[in-house]
Amino acid sequence: MATAVWCSTLSISSSNPECQGLGLGKLIMEHLMAWIMQEADETAIISLIADIPADGLYRQFGFDYSRPESVGMEYQWNRD
């Protein structure tokens, strides 16, 4: 039996204070979740890494914390 795997990454980040708090993240999430609900298989696992306090935004869309079973991890190259 064949299994189809689809993997994609979307990065949403705003370090510019003038762009924060305008509802842009919520607008993006509304459109993204509508697309996911239409296109993703019901067995799909949608995961994300959220910075605090942005986790509150994602909780509005039904995301919940995966810890302690899972944690977000990253590797940053030594830029010295």
Image: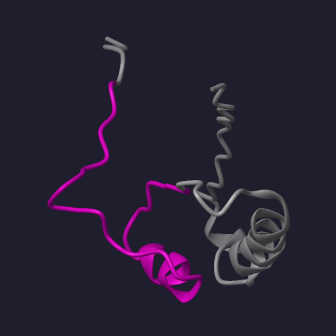
- Place of residue 49 in the rendered image (x, y in percent of width and height, measured from the top left): 44, 54
Q: Residue at x 70, y 57 (%)?
A: 41
- Place of residue 45 in the rendered image (x, y in percent of width and height, measured from the top left): 53, 55
How many marks the image carries: the answer is 0
Residue reaching furthest front? 1
Q: Is 2 included in the stretch rendered in magenta?
A: no
Left or right position of 74 against 58: left
Look at the image and name its color scheme. one colour
Q: Is 55 included in the stretch rendered in magenta?
A: yes
Residue reaching furthest left? 68
Q: Residue at x 74, y 71 (%)?
A: 33
Q: Nearer the viewer, residue 27 or 22?
A: 27
Q: Which residues are magenta?
A: 46-75
Q: Nearer the viewer, residue 20 or 5?
A: 5
Residue reaching furthest bottom? 60
For the C terminus, the quadrant is top left
For the N terminus, the quadrant is top right
Q: Residue at x 48, y 75 (%)?
A: 63
Q: Nearer the viewer, residue 45 or 74?
A: 45
Q: Residue at x 25, y 50 (%)?
A: 71
Q: Quadrant of residue 79?
A: top left
- Place of residue 32 in the rendered image (x, y in percent of width and height, measured from the top left): 78, 66
Q: What secondary structure predominates along the stretch shown in magenta?
A: loop
Left or right position of 51 against 14: left
